[in-house]
Amino acid sequence: MITVAHKPERGPLEWPLIVAVLGLMVMGFIFIASATLAKDYAAALPWHRQDHFKQLIWYAGGAALAAIACLTSYRRIARWAVIGYWLCVLLLVAVLIPGIGSTQGWGAMRWIDLGPFQFQPSELAKLAFILTLANFLSRPEPELRDWRPFVQAIGLAVLPFVLILKEPDLGSALVFLPVGLVMMFVAGVPWRRLVFFVGAVGLVVVALLVDILFAPPSWQIKLEPYQRKRLLVYFGVDFAGPNATDAERQRAQREYRDASHNVQQALISVGSGGLTGKGWRQGTQNALGYLPRAVAHNDFIFSVIAEESGFVGSLTVIALYTVVLFSGLRIASQARDRLGRLLAIGIVALLFCHVFVNIGMNIRLMPVTGIPLPLLSYGGTSVLCSLVAMGLLLNVQLYRQS
């Protein structure tokens, strides 16, 4: 009897996802151009050195990588995931070494200088972590009831978390924990263990906040000065101590104004856009430099969009992300194996964390952190990794296993 070798069943492409991603890329290009052309020196640069043109190159390179990620079976990719994970760990260690790691603003060592561009290992580590954890958790569900796989899964998240925290990059470090917990919950790890871990982390966070906000300076846990100031601004705590002199109080008020400047200007930008905005390149907060030009095209790109395209533009951004998220959930629900389902859920959780935190800090629902808005914020590594993640989502849809 002749048997035919089994081939993976190819499902249809998720066109709403593709259209939404293209829409985000178009908006990113348009508003990065608006944010960067407001700089005095930018207008004098040749077109091929403009930041929005560089972003277009990143989009093209990311699309090519997404196509490769889409057309190579995710099962084959997952087999190499653990190697990619440990390579990312080595890169995260290397970036902390003076002479290898490169600094940009606040003295944080988050980049490796490759000459023509700088590479941020933490962005790649997020994808490697999701692939590795999905492959690890795709084992039979009864095995996950043991304590050992649970501890190992937590360890996979904690290792890059600690290394990225040392850079320091609190925003990027924190996403590893919720993404890992969501993936473990979907995989079938007993919920009591997850609740125990969440409770333990919650107690640590509360203790840290109490220490930062209320403890005497000599007792406080060591944080970077800008990190402490961001938390104090978020909670509205006066920088001056209760026994401060008038001179110290005036100095503290100036420091508070400086530390809260970005978020205050971002709020003004979002609120001043009205229904339809002031028009492309007509936003006064951006054009006049009230919204700091060093961050307007990356961390605070949502504020630029809100000011220039108003509520309509802001709602369009949220709608496009909603389409991407629900498309990812649809792909996860249709995946015919645990690996594909966990991979899709991990990517959806990662995207949600980025969108929620970034937009939240633009409207002061979250503390300011240096976490990009996927496909909209300027930045090569972020764009490449975001598009590869979209390619992996389409991969799960395309290579459904029968």
Image (cartoon, rainbow, N blue to C red):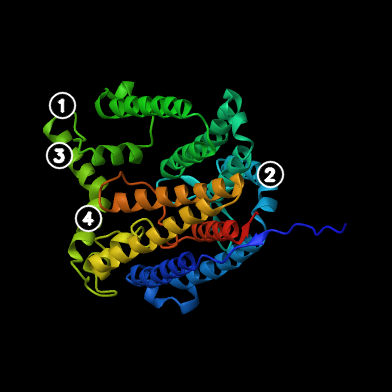
Q: Which amino acid does label 2 sit on?
A: Ile
Task: Look at the numbered discs 2 and 4 and tell me whether their residues touch, using CB distance below 8 Å.
Answer: no
Residue at figure coordinates x 32%, y 71% from the top left = 38
Q: Is residue 265 left or right of residue 301?
A: left
**SS category of the residue bearing label 4:** helix
Against 154, is 11 above or below?
Answer: below
Q: How far apart in space, not on screen, are marks 2 and 1 (Cα)?
A: 53 Å
Rendering coords of residue 112 (x, y %):
57, 51
Rendering coords of residue 137 (x, y %):
59, 38
Frontmost of labels 1 and 4 is 4
Q: Earlier in the sequence, mark 3 or mark 2?
A: 2
Against 253, is 320 above or below?
Answer: below
Against 200, is 100 above or below?
Answer: below
Q: In this view, does 21 lie to the left or right of 228?
A: right
Frontmost of labels 3 and 4 is 4
**What residue did someone put label 2 on?**
83
Quadrant location, the N terminus? bottom right
**SS category of the residue bearing label 2:** helix
**What residue did someone put label 4 on?**
267
Picture quadrant where residue 308 is located: bottom left
Quadrant location, the C terminus? bottom right
Q: Which amino acid does label 1 sit on?
A: Pro
Frontmost of labels 3 and 1 is 1
**What residue did someone put label 3 on?**
250
Q: Which of marks 1 and 4 is nearer the N terminus?
A: 1
Q: Is residue 53 left or right of residue 285?
A: right
